[in-house]
Image: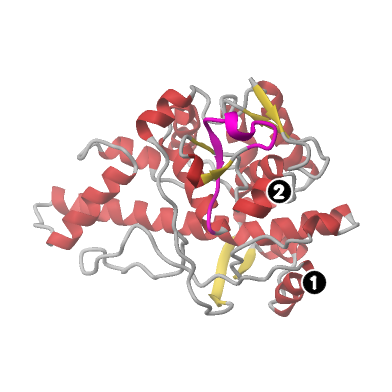
Amino acid sequence: MQWVDTKAFGGLGQRIGFERFALGFLFLAIGGLVGSVVLGRTSLPVTPLLEHAPLERPVAALRLTDAETVAAAFGSQGYRLDRVREEGVVPRVFLAVLPSDLEAIQGVRERKRLFLQTVLPLILHVNETIAEQRKRALALTEAKQRGVRLATKDSDWLRDLYAYYRVPEGDLSELLRRVDVIPPSLALAQAAEESGWGTSRFAQEGNAIFGQWTLSLHRGLVPLERGGESRVAVRSFRDLAGSVRAYTRNLNTHLAYRELRAKREALRRRDIPLNGYTLAGTLRFYSERGEAYIQTLRSLIRSNKLRHFDRARLTGDVYASLPESGA
């Protein structure tokens, strides 16, 4: 089954598959989607035994709503994609929403550039958080194996991590299989495809850039052609960070994407850098289009030179400190 909301995608005719969670809404109904929050930059301790760090961290996100202002903000930080491709450095400029006039930009290259610049720092931030979780989980587990008695806050943190990633407590192998990053090239390609490069109704009104579905109608936007008959909605978020975070957790926990996690683990064991082009081949269940969807993602990665961003990292301080947005 396939739903198409051409108005929502500004006439681009982007396809929205009913099977975004692949094996159907049975899994979604059983597991549900976690409520999202805004992420942010909070340093984890160098020695994880000494300080507790929450799984969810707030971020000061800029609410810039027009493309000209967004471009100026990026320019003031020397944030250019060609520079990122060469140096691999991305400033901590986090936007809460996409420019509302993104679709009005006449130049396709300019529209794509602003979209990628907006989403990339958020993806890198979420990956940074996941990498810190992985490092700390390993340190705590190794300490336990040496006979160290963990502080209550550390034991609680580790238990919460197992629960968050839906892993039986103590199964470290499965935990590490899930607590790992998503290559930016893959996340960017999926965000571009699922949101019509940020112009879809769902992206503009609900900060939904990955096409995730929810059974809770009050938590999402119903496709226009479904109206009052719909029993599902596209999950909406208060800001873009929530969408990115829910997306990474989805790929890292859902049964439909266990092939991605297994492939990623295999690359790790062979000491091969993760790349989105390779892992895209595991996402046939993300869309009802199956293999065609994989080819679309790989085409986006190639044609937009997204693989360069797999080496990117965040640097410097947060650009601005505005009131934090909630979940």
Describe residue 63's horizontal placement relative to residue 6 as left or right: left
Image coordinates of residue 125 in percent, x first then y, are: 51, 60
Tell me the residue at 59%/33% (across/down).
228
Image coordinates of residue 188 in percent, x first then y, are: 65, 48
Tell me the residue at 36%/51% (across/down).
134
Q: Is label 1 in contact with label 2 (beta carbons under 8 Å)?
A: no
Q: Which residues are magenta?
A: 223-238
- Amino acid residing under circle 2: Leu
Tell me the residue at 14%/51% (across/down).
144
Question: Mark 1: which secondary structure?
Answer: helix
Q: In the drawing, what numbered circle is on residue 306?
A: 2
Q: Residue furthest front?
A: 228
Taking depth in this image into account, of 277 and 122 the one nearest to the observer is 122
* Residue at image mark 1: 68
Image coordinates of residue 11 in percent, x first then y, are: 83, 40
**How far is the residue under mark 1 from the one under mark 2?**
24 Å
- Amino acid residing under circle 1: Glu
Query: Residue 85 is drawn in which quadrant?
Result: bottom right
Question: Mark 2: which secondary structure?
Answer: helix
